[in-house]
Amino acid sequence: MKIQKKVGKSIWYYIKNYKFKSLLIQNFLFIVTFATVPLITTIYRNYVSFEQEMNLRMEESNMELLLKSATVIDNIVSDVMTILEEMQDSPECRYLYESNYFSAQYRENAEWVKGRIEDYKIHYPYVKSICLYSKRNQLVLDDTEIVSIEEIEGRGYKWYDIDRIFPMEDPYTLVGDDGNIMFCAPLYREESIAAGLLVVNVDTAVLGNRLEREAAPAARSFFILDISGQAMYCNNEENLLGAHKQYYQRLIGKARNAESSMEEAENSTKVVSVSSSIHRSWKYALVTDKPLYTEEMGKLRNLLVGSVITGVLPSLLVAYLITVVTYRPVKKILNVVEKPEEYIYNEREASNEVLYITSNILNTIDRKEKMEDELTNRLQSLRVAQSLALQFQVDPHFLFNTLEMIKWTTVEDMGSGNRASRQLTKVARLYRIALESDNMILPLKEEIEFLHLYIEILDIRYDGSIRFEWEIDEKLYDCRVVKLCIQPLIENAVKHGLKPKNYNGTIWIRAERVGETMCICVENDGVEMSVSEIAAMNHSFAGRNGFQDARVGLLNINERIKLLYGLEYGLKLEKRGEGLQGMKVILTFPIT
């Protein structure tokens, strides 16, 4: 992107010089009247309804946080239920609570189950422990050992006391003495006889960390309530003790199910939201102190009040900025008129009438410079072309006579019909065709006749080891091409493609019509160029490079075509195709 130079006199110079100083005051009064006063009025009206909207947003925000927290817990419950179902369905677990402890198969299955429990604990960090209780064997298995039921005294196995006194038939949850939540699933034998219990112990400390990281922050109180409405868990353990627990349970009891509301309690206002679990008969509640919200909202209120107080100063600043922006196009036009050479045209500036004028002035200057550059380049190309033409202004008869003299000398020394004399004869004819005609453009048919003569010389030189295939559409014979544009391509194919193969191979010469374009292709099955080399050559072919000194190569052919027909025509280099060895060069000309 072009960058515009910062030149010319300052805006204040033009304002003073052209008596535009009053614009600053006029813009200021206009903005105060039509912008600042309505702004202050709007702020006042918004402030009146601010409290109502704030309460509604607090309730909505609290419910959103609760639903996020509930989703975290529901996902964990879903994982725990999956663990219980997988272990209940496992033949190894079933064997442990149905079979005799003293069998070798029992010990083997026990090791498998302990490994599985360890895997669950690694995969689910919130799983603190998993216990399998067998009533038949009166044994408890976890990830470390197998112990008798008498040895679990003092380990916090509250589930055993419940199961022993009042066994449940359906899965249930308990809160342990350490505050962790235990998910219990009764086990049955095929004859529907109670066989034991499977317990997954969830670490509420890990649960709290995950909640704080993914959902409700620690500053809020998140509760899990059982079917009776008793709090099973809170991320703030203090709220589960004594008077705090009773206070929060009364507060949550006032709130309606699956809704948010403002609750007044003990000289404070709290936002309470309640939702139901999708997996169990639980409820979730989130209690937030209103000051947590009002602190943020207070910042916004102070900002609005500050905006009213400082309304005059921004009006003055905006007035100045508008004055500068308004006058900038005029300044730009004046600078262009005074010093057009110090500006660079940027198309993005043509966005309104004043800038359109400026852009057109700059665009005219830019086009003029481009035309001058193009003229310079063409004059340079013309000088190069004149130089090349002078190099070829050698009397053709001198070349013919010299070749004839060498040929007869060869005949005298080596006898008639030798290869050298035959080659000299054909070379003489080749020079006659190449040098005697003054036309730079000739029909394709004449170019092909020249190529046949050149190929005859190659056949003599390489004893016919190079095969040539012709695929020329005869309808293109009268189409005109640049003189001597195909022969260098054949020479290039022999030198770079077939030379590494000891000059053994095939060269295809094709010409076809594609729309309004004639495509001439010289293709060989020799050595290929690398992808980077092909890309570099095609990049050179895409633009104008001028004539190359001291040689006539692919770049010069490309330059001649573009000079005569335009940039859309010229050379292109490609590989032959998938699965085919070799290269091809494509020439494009307009159908004329």
Image: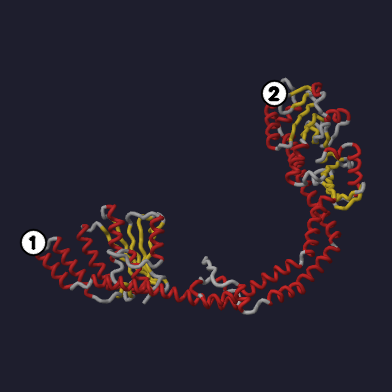
Left or right of residue 245: residue 93: left
Measuring 71% from the left and 21% from the top, which residue is drawn there?
A: 103
* Residue furthest top as drawn: 102
Left or right of residue 373: residue 361: right
User: Residue under circle 1?
Assistant: 415
Q: Quadrant of residue 25?
A: bottom right
Measuring 44% from the left and 73% from the top, which residue is drawn there?
A: 370
Residue 179, image x, y percentages: 82, 34
Q: Is residue 279 above or below residue 373?
A: above
Q: Which mark is residue 7?
A: none
- Mark closest to the chain's N terminus, 2 or 1: 2
Q: Quadrant of residue 53?
A: bottom right
Residue 225, image x, y percentages: 85, 42
Residue 277, image x, y percentages: 81, 46
Which amino acid does the dot numbered 1 rest on? Gly
Measuring 91% from the left and 50% from the top, which residue is drawn there?
A: 264
User: Residue under circle 2?
Assistant: 107
Q: Is residue 190 visible?
A: no
